[in-house]
Amino acid sequence: MEILINLGYLVAAVLFILGIKGMTTPKTAVRGNQFSASGMLIAVIVALLDHNVVSYEYIIIGVLIGGTIGGIMAKKVAMTDMPEMVAALNGIGGGASLLVAAANYLESQKLAEMGKFVPTYDWSIAVILSILIGAVTLTGSFVAVGKLKGKIGDSNKVKLFKWIVKLCLLTLLAGAGYFAAVDPLHADLLVAGLIVLCLVLGVCLVMPIGGADMPVVVSLLNSYSGLAGAAAGFVLGNNGLIITGSLVGASGIILTSIMCKAMNRSLTNVLFGGSMAATAGVSKSENDAFYEGKVKFSSADELAMLLDGAQKVVFVPGYGLAVAQAQHATRELANMLEANGAEVKYAIHPVAGRMPGHMNVLLAEAEVPYDQLVEMDTINPEFSQTDVAIVLGANDVVNPAASKDPNSPIFGMPILDVHNARTVVVVKRGLSPGFAGIPNELFIRDNSLMVSGDAKKVLQDTISALKDL
């Protein structure tokens, strides 16, 4: 039986790896999801066989309640809220690991009284790590959700939070040392105190980080949730949980590294540098003065006339497209342009939409062909041959200051070189700054026009105007 159980965990791990591999391209993403789901089903069944002293009634109740909640959330969540959804699920995963570690600690006390369990250093360290990482992930993720939703603003008390983090870590180190070395089975108050301390630590670690850096934080917290699961696997002696948690932890760290590179920021700078917008220090009046009298406003009718004679058009989707749910209108306009003989592509920045792959998923929902979705490094050389580049709600990822102004807080950040197109049309609700909190030189360039308004409405008006030409 033990051989079959370990073989089952191995099969599940292979399916998880194939699932992650499948996620690397849109064409195989659905199959990758299916592999991963199958692996999880096998892992759950094997875990139940591995620990046969289980009240299946509670398992069934948990599956029904959790499955119902998950199904409702998946159906109702808007694509614009996917980053928040991912962050919340990370937090729930961390909370689950925390509860598993706490429950195992209480169960181990009873087993020790019956002479069936002797604590080891490995077990003690695994319990502490599961509590630490799980609690930090839980509260940190929900602070991230609040920041993504705009309910929690950027803190100006960065130094205070840093001091609280240091104090928490020192206290945690002392408590964990006592737990592991002195009294791992008779320290209920200590364990409760460590849990509270770790929950506070999660809040204080994320609070000083600016809203612009939340995509990186969410990715890092995803990694934390995996590490918490792996630590819980060591607590339970469950090989499947160790493997799964390690895969999630490793992939999360790799994604975090990719996103830091895309934003030209080190992980240390993200975690301890405070808000990027606060660093910029640009007030609303300074932002308004930057644009005053320099922006050339246009209309949907003029955009239609521009597009009528265009041979090559590149759409640049951003968070504004997601907010407006303009993906279907974008596809309809692209179809009209292609029918007129134009070449159409979509330029995808790694962090556009506040989450890796966000724009890809939105456009795939509108059945945009995969081969038209072009990554930043590939599309940038093509902008100089582009007749019209249409920026739909993107801001920082198309700001030329990133490549031209050494004093800019985003200097060095890889951007989409839309400013090299013959004509740039920016569709945006207003002139408010992006997450970095700085004005965008692109909006006042000689080759730039701005059409103010909701992206979906502007595109629909453009489609109507094109039909009338």
Image: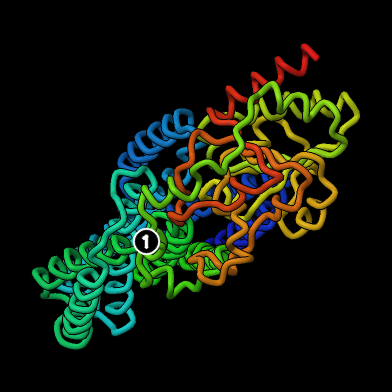
Name the residue furthest left.
Answer: 189
Residue 418 image position (x, y, % from top left) = 70, 50
In terms of image quadrants, where is residue 218? bottom left
Residue at 32% in and 58% down:
140
The residue labelled by disc 1 is: 281
Residue 145 image position (x, y, % from top left) = 36, 48
* Above/below status of 419 relative to 129: above
Is residue 312 at least partly visible in the picture? yes
* Above/below status of 282 relative to 84: below
Is residue 2 at least partly visible in the picture? no
Name the residue furthest right.
Answer: 341
- Is 307 or 102 nearer to us in this picture? 307
- Is 327 or 409 nearer to us in this picture? 409
Residue 355 image position (x, y, % from top left) = 53, 50
- Is 256 or 233 nearer to us in this picture? 256
Residue at 35% in and 55% down:
141
- Is 437 or 259 nearer to us in this picture? 437
